[in-house]
Image (cartoon, rainbow, N blue to C red):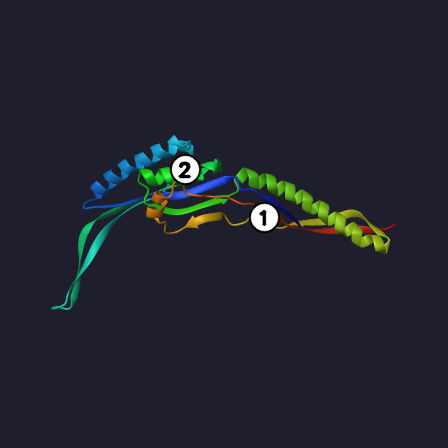
Amino acid sequence: MATASVDPDLLSVIFGIEIQKPTAKQALEENSKMMENVISALKSVGITESEISTSSLNIYPVYEYISDEFLGIQTRELVGYKVSNILSVETEKLNLAASIIDNGVDAGVNRVDSVYYSLSPQKQMDLKDDLLEQAITNAESKAKKALDPLDHTVIGVKSISLSEFGMPYPQPVFSGDFAMAESKIMSSTPVFSSEQDITTSIQVVFLIGSN
């Protein structure tokens, strides 16, 4: 087995705008205008279009339920339409985390689903290769130490079985409901990352012989 503590190199921010208007057209138009402001705000802090994508876009009717106590029935009345437009920002510019959130909120973002750190696909691949090499070296070293008192040594390898690469879960900064009011009060939203532990293990069957 081999383990490494590494710093994440990918920041993901999932946030967007929810707005309700009397008609679907009004809700879509208003949401689109606000979203243009958000994208402009993201670009102003150094985020490129290639780092921004639409995570989800939903339009659904909003009903108000009215109870008639005399008749003992409940009816529903259409009161408008809600549009939810959620963006996904993925960037390796980890130092922009606070600016992304603050500028997004100032531009109209009223929903933040999650902010988390993870490893980019390229870094995962590089780490996997390095850790597999380390795991094999560690296995050979342990085998030789175990055989020394027995006056035997490793003379070859019969088989190697590789396990799954032990990637950690994305490191969340926060998720779910976000207090937008508090965000606007703070001069800058504090966002920090920390190291993540990556592990991999192998099973090696060695051929042994006497000294």
> In this figure, which residue is indicated by the disc labeled 2?
99
Q: Is residue 12 shown to the viewer in this render?
A: yes
Q: Nearer the viewer, residue 139 or 3?
A: 3
Task: Identify which residue is drawn at 86% across, 53% down.
Answer: 151
Describe the element under mark 1 as helix, strand or loop.
Answer: strand
Q: Position of residue 87 (x, y in %)?
A: 37, 41
Q: Quadrant of residue 34?
A: top left
Q: Is residue 51 left or right of residue 35?
A: right
Q: Residue at x 79, y 50 (%)?
A: 144
Residue 47 shown left or right of residue 28 in the figure: right
Residue 102 relative to residue 72: left or right: right
Check the image and report above or below for 55 versus 146: above
Distance in Å between CA atoms under marks 2 and 1: 27 Å
Q: Is residue 139 above or below residue 88?
A: below
The residue positioned 23% from the left and 42% from the top of the image is 27
Disc 2 marks a residue whose amino acid type is Ser
Q: Label 2 neighbourhood size at 10 Å, few (<14), some (14-19), many (20+)?
A: some
The circle on residue 197 is 1
Secondary element under disc 2, as helix, strand or loop, is: helix
What residue appears at the point 62 percent right and 50 percent down from the top-left corner?
163
- The front one of 54 and 103 is 103
Is 84 situated left or right of 25 in this image?
right
Q: Is residue 56 visible?
A: no
